[in-house]
Amino acid sequence: MRGTRAAVLGHPIDHSLSPALHGAAYRLLGVDIDYSRRDVDLGGLPRFLATEGADQDWVGWSVTMPLKAAMVSHMDTVSARVETLGVLNTVVHGPDGMHGENTDVDGIVTALGEAGLRTGAADQGRFGVIGAGSTAAAALAAAAELGFREARSYARSPQRAQALLPVAEALGLRLRLLPLDELGGDLAGDELAAVVSTLPPRAADELAPALPRLLQNVALLDVAYDPWPSVLAGAWERAGGQVVSGLAMLLHQAVRQVERFTAASSRPAASLSAEEHSELVARMRAALPR
């Protein structure tokens, strides 16, 4: 195995649950990977890459805000997904340098699957995304993989949301950009089959009073999981909608990272049997707060 270290990079980083998730996985697998946190902001990224980040004992990094877009230009190679989205959340170190991947998409797809959405259903209606940042781009990719053909973006800044248009076009999605305050009306009009809120904690609280009284089992994935349930998630569930915590997304994107970080190890996670892989996911899930 080429390296023995991995870490989550971002700022602020003290709250990150990634060490608990990855640590549980590597203990189960019996793989010697030391996973830690590294506080790296935008200004400090070049220095980190030139110093500690240049060490040869890394197997990979989980990348969180505010580095998801900034890290892309430093990669030696990127996946087709990252090339389309312009953001990554995973860096894999290998003999050919640093490779960028985005497992947030896998996390969203699998988390929504827990609410009953299945890949490949062509007539699922429209997909809603609250917010216009890096995770919103990943949410659009998830919508395309789930079989949606139309999406709507609800954001405070229409100008910032414009950056999602070429992403949607590349994904084959028809995308409408709408003000944040139009979400309630679209839900009342049965316009949406699923919604992903990508706003930071408490930023979506203001949307709760505008929700319709009946949501007809519309699925919501709220990526903000602290505190949980969020005000939005609580109101959504009371109105009859399906709610998935952002912890589910966090879990499943980390599972994909573990598969990539252990690829060259004595026990690659991607080579586990179905039963063993289920146990891996269960152990990682148990490491999350209740």
Image (cartoon, helix red, strand yellow):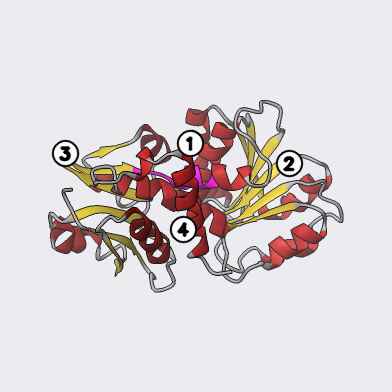
Main secondary structure found in the magenta portion: helix
Instruction: Name the N-terminal-most of marks 4 and 1.
Output: 1
Instruction: Name the N-terminal-most of marks 2 and 3.
Output: 3
Where does the image place residue 6, in percent across and percent down from the top left? 27, 58
Say whether residue 65 is visible. Answer: no
CA gap, disc 1 and disc 3: 28 Å
- Which residue matches tag 3? 96
Q: Is residue 92 above or below residue 271?
A: below
CA gap, disc 4 and disc 2: 32 Å
- Which residue matches tag 1? 167
For the image, the number of numbered tags is 4
Region of the chain picked out in magenta, as a range: 101-108
| Label 1 with label 3: CB-CB less than 8 Å | no
The amino acid sitting under disc 2 is Leu
| Label 3 with label 4: CB-CB less than 8 Å | no
What SS does tag 1 mark? helix
Q: Does residue 267 show up magenta in the picture?
A: no
Query: Which residue does the image show at 24% across and 65% down from the upper left?
Result: 44
Say whether residue 240 is visible. Answer: yes
The amino acid sitting under disc 4 is Met
What SS does tag 4 mark? helix
Query: Which residue does the image show at 62% across and 45% down from the upper left?
Result: 112
Query: Which mark lies nearer to you, 2 or 3?
Result: 3
CA gap, disc 2 and disc 3: 43 Å
The amino acid sitting under disc 3 is Asp
- Which residue matches tag 4? 284
Left or right: 240 as drawn, with respect to 103: right
Query: Which residue does the image show at 12% across and 54% down from the upper left?
Result: 56
Instruction: Name the N-terminal-most of marks 3 and 4.
Output: 3
| Numbered badge on residue 192 | 2
Left or right: 98 as drawn, with respect to 9: left
Where does the image place residue 53, in percent across and percent down from the top left? 18, 59
